[in-house]
Image (tube, coloured by chain):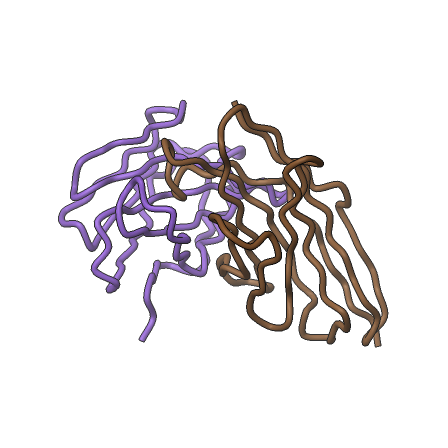
Amino acid sequence: DTAVSQTPKYLVTQMGNDKSIKCEQNLGHDTMYWYKQDSKKFLKIMFSYNNKELIINETVPNRFSPKSPDKAHLNLHINSLELGDSAVYFCASSQDPASLRPLHFGNGTRLTVT
Amino acid sequence: AQSVTQLDSQVPVFEEAPVELRCNYSSSVSVYLFWYVQYPNQGLQLLLKYLSGSTLVKGINGFEAEFNKSQTSFHLRKPSVHISDTAEYFCAVSDLRKGAGKSTFGDGTTLTVKP
């Protein structure tokens, strides 16, 4: 059973399009995250939701809008895609926001904007 | 503010050789440290963590790390590597206020194990 699963695995699209990435976790965790990993492998947090409530929003353009229909799901919608949005996007979850238990990551969605 | 520096961006080694991946951190508060591994086309997985107690921490796949408070380091070691250890390794630091989710990650070290 996959603990954190995200779809699609690969996403190739043109500039200006709108796309979504979906994430689901079956660990019973309260907190979910979106991270962006750029071409140099640098990993940066974008958003975090705790029990459907947004708790972290790191200076991300408002073209990016996360949505959490329930605590097991966190989706990422991106409007008006730009070349610089090309990256690997990772979903992750943890027990709760303050937990020091390690994060559980999905396998990533490689977004390529042409 | 916290920061993490992984001193080597790439580490090539031969199979069965020992390896050390270096990680230094800076923080004004007590820290908790993690090493994650990312295999090709996969997400990050926890290798090991230091929260408190013994400064020598053992993780999965034969890796271990030593927390050195005076040198603010948390270097990762393995006495004999396998081809399958080829991956990207990330050091991360957090503290009680932030939790693991808001860890600061290093830039990663690419370990390449050659036959």
Q: Is residue B111 left or right of residue B45?
A: right
- Residue shown at 76% from the left, 63% from the top: B112
Residue furthest to the front in view is B53
Residue A57 in the image, given as x and y percentages of width and height: 33, 28
Residue furthest to the left in view is A70
The picture quadrant where one finds residue B6 is top right
Q: Is residue B77 left or right of residue A28?
A: right
In this view, B41 is above or below B24: below
- Residue shown at 19% from the left, 44% from the top: A68
The answer to whether one can see residue A114 in this image is no
- Residue shown at 53% from the left, 45% from the top: B33
Residue B104 in the image, given as x and y percentages of width and height: 51, 36
**Quadrant of the drawing holding the N terminus of chain A:** bottom left
Q: Nearer the viewer, residue A23 or B80?
A: B80
- Residue shown at 38% from the left, 34% from the top: B98
Q: Is residue B87 left or right of residue A50?
A: right
The answer to whether one can see residue B83 in this image is yes
The picture quadrant where one finds residue A48 is top left
The picture quadrant where one finds residue A98 is top left
In this view, B61 is above or below A108: below
Q: Which chain is brown?
A: B
In this view, A82 is above or below B34: above
Q: Which chain is purple?
A: A
